[in-house]
Image (cartoon, rainbow, N blue to C red):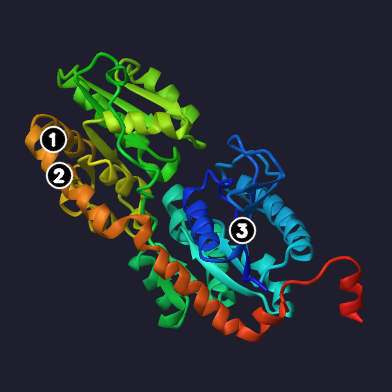
Amino acid sequence: MGKKILIIVENLPVPFDSRVWKEARALHQHGYEVSVLSPRGKGYWQTHEILEGIHIYRHPMPKEANRPLGYLWEYGCALFWEFLFSWWIFFTRGFHVIQGCNPPDNIFLVALPFRLFGVKYIFDQHDAGPELYHSKYERKDSYYQAQVWLERLTYRASDVVIATNSSYRDLALSRGGMEPDDVLVVRNGPDLETFRLVPPDPALRYGKKFLVGYVGTMSEQDGLEILLEVAARIKASGRTDVHFTCVGGGPGLTGLRQMITQMNLADTVDFTGRIPDEHLLRVLSTADVCVNPDKPCEMNDISTMIKVMEYMALGKPIVQFDLREGRFSAGEASLYARADLGAEDFAAKILWLLDHPEERSRMGGVGRDRVATQLAWEFSVPNLLKAYDRAIFKTGRADIAGGAAAPPSGKEQVESAQ
């Protein structure tokens, strides 16, 4: 029988979650039978569909929360549906491995009962839960302690951990007590087959000489308030030749659009919301400089942002704060603003790049080459496959061959139980 897996992600629907979709496609292309369970939303409302041979199941989901109590309700509802759908998938298709993608760090609870059937658990750590909570609310209260507790239990329940970078791998080894062989780094690089430069669209400059581009989530830790302050400083300096376009959705989008009006920036900044990939590529391909304004904090210091490598893949120079993993990804493709000088230094570095086209070209080339030779998704696939080999080895090859974790259906289920 084929090797069957179930990937559970709660944060975004699939295939909109680009990392999970790349993982699912890579595993399917290497002989795995892949099922994915994710929430409905963002244009993906079908309960079940098959894309590129991958079975995608989607469960109901309440409105995205932005407060601790709201998160409890959101995560509780998701956990309920994940339990129900997982058993349905188990008895209709079967699986030998569950891969849980955080946030939140509670998906291991869904996987625990399946241990009775020899199913193993891979933890795909997208975020550091405790640091993510602290970056949003800047307090270490009972909710923070719950994040610490859930993370610890997740590590204990995991047979293998997939970390997005070396900083997260260190967390699994130190806080999680994982064995080094059970933690593999699978970076979230762009897929160069689909994420490619397209011809620029001058209309997207809104009549200005320069365009500064951003793509990402609009939430507390993503620093969009800082970027608006940057735009305000540039406008106040007399530079009316710069436009900012920010692409993406999230719980902070409505408030940010209100801030544009309050700060008199309607002629300088626009938030597109979520747009098709084709339009996103036009915006970024037209941009002269791309930005990553993630606020300096522990969470952002240890996290790898896919947008940085996407900017690099398109040959765009970057401005961001000087954070550990951001510097590792971008290297000389970025200028790094000082955290203590905040928006003032960030704005100065954007203007310096805009006024030095030869340096923009050099930095863009450095970034494009680094992605093409080291950081693209294709370089992450081998470690993804190693993680599954490790999990399956711990499961036991006999279980795979005999289908212990892939129960038959109908009458065969009753006969096998007897």
Q: Are marks 2 and 1 in contact (CB under 8 Å)?
A: yes
> Where, by quadrant of the figure, is residue 257 drawn?
top left
| Residue pictured at 92% horizontal, 69% vertical | 411
Which residue is tagged 1?
353
Estimate the x, y position of residue 269 in percent, counting from the top left: 33, 23
Q: Earlier in the sequence, mark 2 or mark 1?
A: 1
Question: Is 173 located above or below residue 369 in the figure?
Answer: below
Identify which amino acid the numbered label 2 is placed on. Answer: Met
Q: Are marks 1 and 3 in contact (CB under 8 Å)?
A: no
> Where, by quadrant of the figure, is residue 13 drawn?
top right
Which residue is tagged 3?
8
| Residue pictured at 28% horizontal, 46% vertical | 313
Question: Is 178 located above or below residue 51 in the figure?
Answer: below
Q: Earlier in the sequence, mark 1 or mark 3?
A: 3
| Residue pictured at 91% horizontal, 74% vertical | 414
Identify which amino acid the numbered label 3 is placed on. Answer: Ile
**Mark 2 surroundings within 10 Å by alpha-carbon count, few (fewer than 14), some (14 through 19), many (20 or more):** many
Residue 364, label in figure: none
In the rendered structure, the answer to whether residue 70 lies left or right of residue 283 reads: right
Of residue 162 and residue 132, the one placed in the foreground of this image is 162
Identify which amino acid the numbered label 1 is placed on. Answer: Leu
**Mark 1 surroundings within 10 Å by alpha-carbon count, few (fewer than 14), some (14 through 19), many (20 or more):** many
Estimate the x, y position of residue 336 in percent, counting from the top left: 18, 47
Which residue is tagged 2?
363
